[in-house]
Amino acid sequence: MQRTVIFDLDGTLVDSRPDIHAALNRLMQARGLAPFTLAEVTRFIGDGVPVLLARAFAARGLPADPTAQPAFLADYEANAAVHTKLFGGMAAVLDGLAAEGWAMAVCTNKPEKAARLLLGALGLDGRFAALGGGDSFPVRKPDPAHVLATLAAAGGTPGAAVMVGDHHNDIAAGRAAGVPVVYCGWGYGLPEMAEGAPVADSPAALPALLRQALAAPRPQAGPSSSR
């Protein structure tokens, strides 16, 4: 069977915090609100743009602003790759996995257009067999259907796939889909979000953990949960 690795994007493949931080602070400035630190914005990331913005406004004691998402996305999409980079060592890992015959896909809660623009700007748009964005399907992580739909689009099957991510949503969605998971220790999530999954301390540790995950007994699919 075709081996497939499904990657989360932000905090897993790329360090996108600087550009998300900058776009969010421009949004805050336009509304006369105080800016956020990079550490604060890091904790907002992982559940998609609507939740990112809701957390930002809540942190300022305000309800969600319905005009904020279009303004934020227009700004972010134009500036998504100013400072965003692949994590160190990740390019070599992607090269190695491709050479081993792995198919690769991206399953992210970032809107699909923004994710495609970012991957294109980084020269990565030809790397992946499929991209499942946060608005590509009726559901998004932690719903396992997001992982399964992305996997199907990549031509893979749960029996020969591994989910890789840095957030509780990635672990929950992968496990609920019956797919083994590997947690990224270099990402944005808190250590406890690994929830017992194997932890890769660096991108270089990923290939061996992926092979081990496929060789291990398969997890049973179950209901998803959310943070």
Image: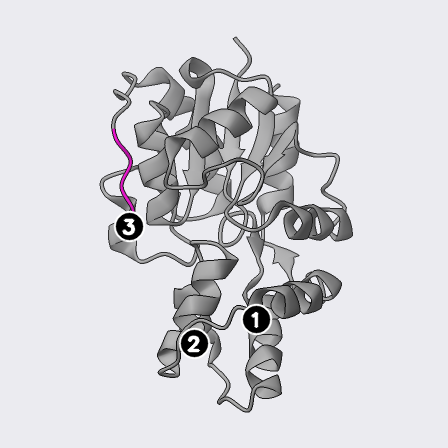
Above/below status of 159 relative to 171? above
Q: Tag 3 or tag 2, which sits nearer the N-term?
A: 2
Which residue is at 33% across, 22% downward? 178
The relative height of residue 119 versus residue 221 in the rendered view (above or below) is below
Secondary structure under tag 3 reads helix
Q: Camera-side residue: 72 or 170? A: 72
Identity of the residue furthest to the front in this view: 66
Q: Is residue 3 left or right of residue 121?
A: left
Picture coordinates of residue 139, whole percent (x, y): 45, 38
Q: Are marks 2 and 3 in contact (CB under 8 Å)?
A: no
Left or right, 218 with respect to 46, comes to left
| Residue 128 sits inside the magenta stretch | no
Residue 87 in view (yes/no) = no
Give residue 5's position: percent from left, percent from top: 51, 28
Colouring method of the image: one colour
Tell me, yes or no, if residue 53 can be seen here: yes
For the residue labelled by badge 1, is the local secondary structure a helix, a strand or a loop? helix
Query: In this figure, which residue is indicated by the disc labeled 3?
Result: 193
Label of residue 68 in the image: 1
Precedes in sequence: disc 2 or disc 1: 2
Residue type for callout 2: Phe
Q: Which residue is drawn at 55% across and 91% down?
A: 32
- Labelled disc at residue 57: 2
Main secondary structure along the magenta-highlighted residues: loop
Q: Give the range drawn in magenta.
A: 223-227
Amino acid at the residue labelled 3:
Met
Q: Earlier in the sequence, mark 1 or mark 3?
A: 1
